[in-house]
Image (cartoon, grey):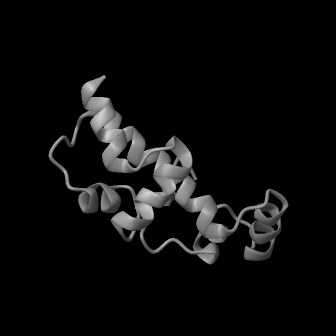
Amino acid sequence: MLERQLYLRHDLTRDCLAREVLTNRTYITRALKGRGLSFPQFVNSFRAAHAIELMASGRYPDASPEELALLSGFSSADTMNRYVKKSAGLTACALRERMKDG
């Protein structure tokens, strides 16, 4: 997932991931369920980390939240904000402001 950055694919499905890692979707579902995660939660946690990394890098200082979301594999800025907040404790906009100030 990390090495190939599969989480950046907007069309990533459980079946697609299973093909990429040479297993089946049932195994992926069971493995994630054992960790208390759904497939979207699993993928979106990687996307949130990527969005945070993009903001910290300063490579896209003028990118809108929608652009950052798309660059990170999210389908919407709302979903990105929800997962960034879960991960960092702040929305993407608030986190970006804090990074600029600090």
Query: Please, is residue 41 above or below residue 58 in the view?
Result: below
Please state if 18 lies on the left or on the right of 44 as rendered: right
Q: Could you tell me residue 60's position as x and y percent? A: 21, 43
Residue under the point 58% across and 73% down: 16
Please state if 64 lies on the left or on the right of 83 as rendered: left
Please state if 100 lies on the left or on the right of 80 as rendered: left
- Res. 93 visible in picture: yes
Residue found at the far left of this picture: 62
Residue under the point 80% across and 56% down: 35
Displayed quadrant of residue 67: bottom left
Disc tally is 0
Q: Could you tell me residue 76's position as x and y percent? A: 36, 69
Q: Nearer the viewer, residue 87 or 7?
A: 87
Please state if 73 lies on the left or on the right of 24 as rendered: left
Q: Could you tell me residue 38's position as x and y percent? A: 69, 68
Residue under the point 76% across and 62% down: 32
